[in-house]
Amino acid sequence: MAMARLWVLLPLALAFPTPPEQTQEQVEIFEKAKARAKAASEAATPQVLAFFDGTLFREMLKDCCPAVAHLPASELLKRYRAEAQVAELAHALPSDNSGQRTPSADVTISELGNMSWFPNEYQVNLMSGKNSSSRGEDISDDAMKEIFGCKAFAGAVPTWSEASSRLIYVAHNMRRLDTGSEPHFGDFTVIFNSSRMKDSVLIAPYDTGMYTMNCLHPGLHPGSQTKTQSSSGQPGPPGPPMADLNCTAWSKDHKVDLPVGTLDYLDHLILPNLWSAINTTVSNQTVLDAARVLFSRSGISGIDYEDVPAMKESERNDYFESDILANPPVPAAVKLGIGSFATLFGTEEGRQLQTMALRYKWPLFWAYGEGTQTGPPPPQSQKVKSQKLNRRMADPSNIVKTTNASVSSSAAKQFENVWQEAVEARASRQVTDEDLLQWWNSLDQELRVAPVSASSCAQPHHCVGVDIAKKDCICKVQDEIFMV
Ligand SMILES: *[C@@H]1O[C@H](CO)[C@@H](O)[C@H](O)[C@H]1NC(C)=O
Ligand SMILES: *[C@@H]1O[C@H](CO)[C@@H](O)[C@H](O)[C@H]1NC(C)=O
Ligand SMILES: *[C@@H]1O[C@H](CO)[C@@H](O)[C@H](O)[C@H]1NC(C)=O
Ligand SMILES: *[C@@H]1O[C@H](CO)[C@@H](O)[C@H](O)[C@H]1NC(C)=O
Ligand SMILES: *[C@@H]1O[C@H](CO)[C@@H](O)[C@H](O)[C@H]1NC(C)=O
Ligand SMILES: *[C@@H]1O[C@H](CO)[C@@H](O)[C@H](O)[C@H]1NC(C)=O
Ligand SMILES: *[C@@H]1O[C@H](CO)[C@@H](O)[C@H](O)[C@H]1NC(C)=O
C-alpha cells in the first residue's frame, strides 16, 4: 500500500537511521561462525575427496563432463572452491508491493533507489510499519536463530538495533541460473559483490526456509504448502509447496547439526548440499543426480553456457543459501543487476530500473528465465518441466556506460525497437509467452552473456559477465584506474 511506504520522509528517516555496515553483534556472530566453519571444513575435506574419487561419481562425470572427468579429486575440489568464491550472491526483490512474490518482506525497485544500504526483511517491516512476528510462526526468525546463530529479539517486535543485526537472504548461484536467484523470487535481482562482502557471508547447505519448514519445525508450519512464507503477517501468494527433503542431511531430531560455512570454509557443506533434496524413500533420484546437475551447470565442467543441461523445477532450490550478515552499502556493495524480461521489459518499471542502474553505475542485464509472465510458484515436486535458464543479455544503453563492453549501434537500436514493440503490446492486450519469446528472439544475440566463472576471467571479481559471442570478459570500469 502506497501510504505505508512513505518511510523515506525525513521524520521517519530519523527514526530509522542508517545502521553501521556491520554491527558489533554481527561481527561477533561472524567471527564465531568462521572459527567453527574452519574446523568443520578441514575435518570434512577427506570425505569430499573420497566422494569425488568414487567409481560411480567418476562414471557420472565421464558422461556429463568429460573435460574434467580425468582430474584428480584434489583438483576438482580446488575448482569447486574457486567457483564457489566467485559464484553470484543473488537477492531478488519485487518491482512493487502489489502481489509481492518474494519469499519475505523486501524493498521495491523505487525504494532501493532511495536507500543508502540494502535493508533486511526485519528492517523493511519496521520501516513500513508492519509487525514482524517472533512467536514461532516466523520461519525466517527460526532459521536465523537456529541455523545462523542470530540473537532472539527481546520483545514481540524487534527494536531498530535488533533488526539491524539480522541478515539478508541470498542465493548462491553456482548453477548459473540466468535470473541469478530462483525465477519466482522477484522482478529484479541484485548481485552483491562477493569480494566486497566476503567477511559477512554465512552459508547454509540448502534453502533455509524450505529446510526449516520440512525438517526443523514440521509441526509448527503444517500446510506450509498453502501459506505464504512472508513474515509480514499479511496473507500473500502461496509459498512453494513442500518438497520431500532429506532431513538427516544436516539435522538430527529437528536440530541443526552442522555449522554454517563461509566463502573460505565450506568443504563441510558440499555433501550435505547435494543430499538435502535427495530422499531415496520417496524418489528415485540419487546423490549422483544432484552432483551431475551441479557439476554440469557450474563453471567447474568447462561446458559452454549455451550448452548447459536443462534443470528441473525442483532443482532450482538446491543452492547454498549464502546470506549476508551486514547492512551492505548501496550502491557500493552491489556488483550488477538483472531485470526480469518477462515482467519488466517494455514497462514503466523497466525504465525506472534502467534509470536507477545508471545512476548507481550498476551494470544491468536482462534474464529470460522461464519466459513466462504470471502465476504463483509452480508445484515443485513431481513436475518434470525442465528449463535451461541460460538466457541473459546485457542492456545496451547501460552496459557501455558501466563496463568496458562495446555494443554495435545496430544491436542498441534493435533493443529500443523491440522495447517499443513491447510497450505497445503491453498497452493494448495481455502479453503471451509467445510474445516474450518473439521479442527475445528478435533482439541481437550479440548482447548475450554468461555469468562470470572463476576460470573465465583473470580478475573475476572485477568482471560482471562474459560476452558469449566474443568470448571476452565484460568488466567494471574502475574510475580509479582510469584517473591515474
Ligand atoms: C525515491 O522516492 C521518491 C519519493 O517517494 C520516488 O518518487 C522515487 O521514485 C524513488 N526512487 C528513485 C529511484 O528516486
Ligand atoms: C504490533 O505489535 C504490537 C506489540 O505486540 C501490538 O501492540 C500492535 O497492535 C501490533 N500492530 C499491528 C499493526 O499489528
Ligand atoms: C568488488 O569489490 C572490490 C573491492 O572489494 C572491487 O575491487 C571490485 O572492483 C568490485 N567489483 C565490481 C564488479 O564492482
Ligand atoms: C523422506 O520423506 C518422507 C516423506 O516426506 C519422510 O517421512 C522422511 O522422514 C524423509 N526422510 C528423511 C531422511 O528425511
Ligand atoms: C539422507 O542423507 C544421508 C547422507 O547425509 C544418506 O546417508 C541417507 O541415505 C539419506 N536418506 C534418504 C532417505 O535418502
Ligand atoms: C522409481 O522407479 C521404479 C522402477 O523404475 C518405478 O516403478 C517408480 O514409480 C519410481 N518412483 C518414482 C517416485 O519415480
Ligand atoms: C575488459 O577488461 C578486462 C580486464 O582488463 C579484459 O580482460 C577484457 O578483455 C576487457 N573486455 C573488453 C570487451 O574490452
Image (cartoon, rainbow, N blue to C red):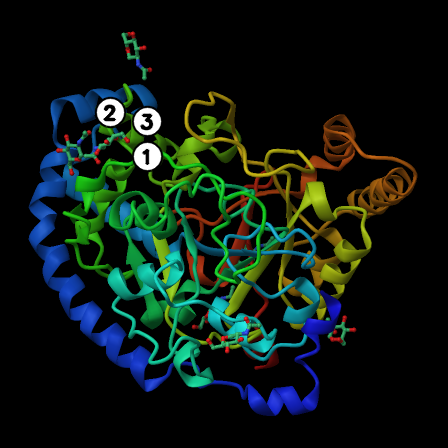
Q: Quadrant of residue 448?
A: top right
Q: Position of residue 53 (x, y in %)?
A: 12, 32
Identify the residue at image location x=38%, y=51%. Answer: 209
Is tag 2's residue or tag 1's residue first in the polypeptide sequence?
2
Mark 1 neighbour density, 10 Å: few (under 14) some (14–19) many (20 or more): many
Return the disc, 1 or 3, that comes first in the chain's sequence: 3
In the rendering, at what x and y percent does residue 462 appear? 48, 63
The kind of residue tagged 3 is Cys
Q: Nearer the viewer, residue 320 or 157?
A: 157
Residue at mark 1: 295
Give me the C-alpha separation between circle 1 and circle 3. 7 Å
Residue 252's tag is none
Is residue 118 in sight in this rendering? Answer: no
- Is the CB atom of the residue marked by disc 3 within 8 angstroms of ligand 5's nearest atom? no
Q: Any mark on residue 286, and which?
A: 2
**Nearer to the camera, 229 or 439:** 229
Badge 2 density bin: few <14, some 14–19, many ≥20, Cα 10 Å: some
Q: Are marks 1 and 3 in contact (CB under 8 Å)?
A: yes
